[in-house]
Image: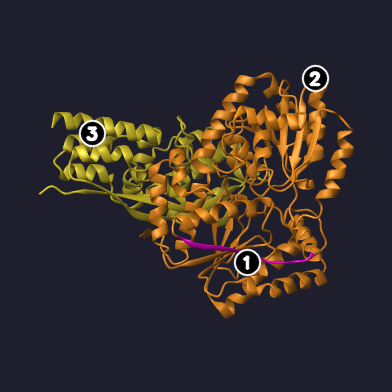
Amino acid sequence: MSKIRDYVPIVGESTIEELFLLAERLKGKIIQNINSTAVGGGVAEILIRMLPLLQDLGVNASWGVIKGDEKFFHITKKMHNALHGVDASIGRDELDYFIDVNRQNTQEIMADADILFIHDPQPIALVEQKDTLGRKWIWRCHIDFTNPKKDVWDFLKNYIERFDCAVFSAPAFSRPLAIRQVLISPSIDPLSEKNRELSDDLVNGICERFNIDRGRPVITQISRFDYLKDPVGVIRAYKMVKKHLDCQLVLAGGGATDDPEGMKVLEEVHREAENDPDIFVLFLPPGSDIEINALQRASDIVLQKSLREGFGLTVAEGLWKGKPVIASAVGGIPLQIAHKYSGILTHSIEGTAYWIKQLLNEPEYAAKLGVNGREHIKYNYLITRHIRDYLLLFLSLYEQKDIVSL
Amino acid sequence: MATTFRFLTRLNLVELLGRRAKNIPELLEGLRLVPGTSIYYHTHRFLQQHHYLSPEPPNDFAFWVTNSLGLDSLGERLASVDTVSFPTIRDLRTKYLEILEFYSQGHNARNGDCPEGQEFHFMSFRTFILPTPYEARDLKEFRDILQKVSINSIYFHIFDARLRLKKGKNDFSNWLEEMGETQLAREISRLDPYTITFEGLRRDLIQRVSRHVKNS
């Protein structure tokens, strides 16, 4: 596991010094993160990396996971889709079940935590305990909130406004609320297995294992098999390109324990792929980070053709590896890509196909996009910036002024 | 007796105000109502996020008007506001309001909504000021520290001190004047830090100070 000082060669000594200065001010405070899954998905991924670094800085941070059955996660999946704007009817009985499961999980709250940091809607109703327990409560929303369905929004808003503060990943998710709202973009870890430098031999070896030909262009989308990531749309874009240019498509991802829909999407993807030997549909088991890293590094173009997106960490991953990235202009993706400067933003299957052809035919321009993209990620979307924002967020709970001298 | 210069640093936490604009009248209304820190945020954000780029993108208002409303001429007017010449955020706000009000008088601005999803989102921030371990007692120490202090510290003393903390001048020039280095103080005051990358600014400061170290 990385130590905080391991990041000095990447972000510089002064950046790490500042983190220590902030952490010092949080001495004596206990912070507990609570979410609904220990593995899979962006939230668990970032917590696994971030907690040891916070602890290394001297911050007393811990992590609890609520427990739920299949029915609970089926309801929260529908809730997730509804927040993305997808029609999903959730009955009163289902909402009651959701609240019951939250109440059954109150024992997950640490007795001595000063700050409860609740991630996403699944454990949101734990905030009912605020009246009895006190403490500072933060709700961290990792989901695209651009067009939430009104009934689900109304249900959640009732809980959100009981928190001291809500945190969103992109400005478009902000809406009038009676509480403070903070913008904190997620981040990637440049030293994680998924993002660290890899030798060519290792990359080649992994490609050989999957029978991917490194002599021909490779286009890759890494994401879990989910309708909102539009893997079928990716295959259709690839088919348009394939009429004119020889290339291969890699669709690779895993599944999270709170995502029962994945298998159904995977079946549709196989059907759309029609046994094309140049389409590689890889359902990767948990812990395949090196494989994902190698597949991104072996790619000529990285795609993220999501229909909705929270932030889209795979975009940051692709950019950090210096790859030209073509991605949908949804959720937090426009924060990561300045169109035609640090990547390409598209709005359709046809647009995606058009830009794949452009970039495959203009490798110098594609390379320039990759270089600029990496710089942008280095300054704004690495884990050290994320840690800094969290430390400031925790400190801000105890301060009222706009300018605070620490 | 010579005074020491204590380098401070500052870190910002960005806040969302829950207010958005989809056309010029809504932008104007927001500009009138949001707190001064929001005006400061939107006129300094690109400096922060894209500080490795030159030329840097302009302020958020100009960027949005140009890219989301397609109003190139108005965008250019907003982009050309000479931030460094305004002593207070209130003056800066007044300037943007004047430009937008003038435009609104000649155009039916309400007809021009941006595409859905490209609304302007008003934001603000909280600033946390921290002491660094660095203290300079003379020009040579000052130059050596400039080489290693974080870019956030330089930003604080150059940008925040003058406009946000209402000191009227950057901290470096104030200290240099106290040290009797009036010429160097004037040189740094005259710089337009808005048209240079942060690392470029650091290099420029170090070069200027180095020249005076040699001459002293």
Specify the subunit that label 3 lies on.
Answer: B
* Residue behind mark 1: A160
Q: Residue at x 53, y 47 (%)?
A: A383
Q: Quadrant of the C terminus of chain A?
A: bottom left
The quarter of the displayed image where residue B115 is located: top right
> Pointers 2 and 3 in contact (CB under 8 A)?
no
Where does residue A218 sit, x and y in percent of width and height? 72, 27
Answer left or right for B141 relative to A48.
Answer: left
Kind of element beneath mark 3: helix
Which shade of the palette goes to chain B? yellow
Say which amino acid is labelled 3.
Answer: Val
Say which amino acid is labelled 1.
Answer: Ile
Q: Toward the viewer: A294 or A44?
A: A294
- Residue B66 versus residue A246 in the image, above or below: below
- Residue A261 versus residue B44 in the image, above or below: below
> Pointers 1 and 3 in contact (CB under 8 A)?
no
Mark 2 or 1: in front is 2
Q: Residue B18 colored magenta? A: no
Q: Residue at x 45, y 62 (%)?
A: A395
3D distance between C-alphas at marks 1 and 3: 52 Å
3D distance between C-alphas at marks 2 and 1: 51 Å
Q: Residue A60 colored magenta? A: yes
The quarter of the displayed image where residue A220 is located: top right
* Residue behind mark 3: B209
Where does residue A203 sit, x and y in percent of width and height? 65, 30
Label 1 Cα crowd, 10 Å radius (few <14 / some 14-19 / many 20+): many
Which disc, if any, is residue A244? 2
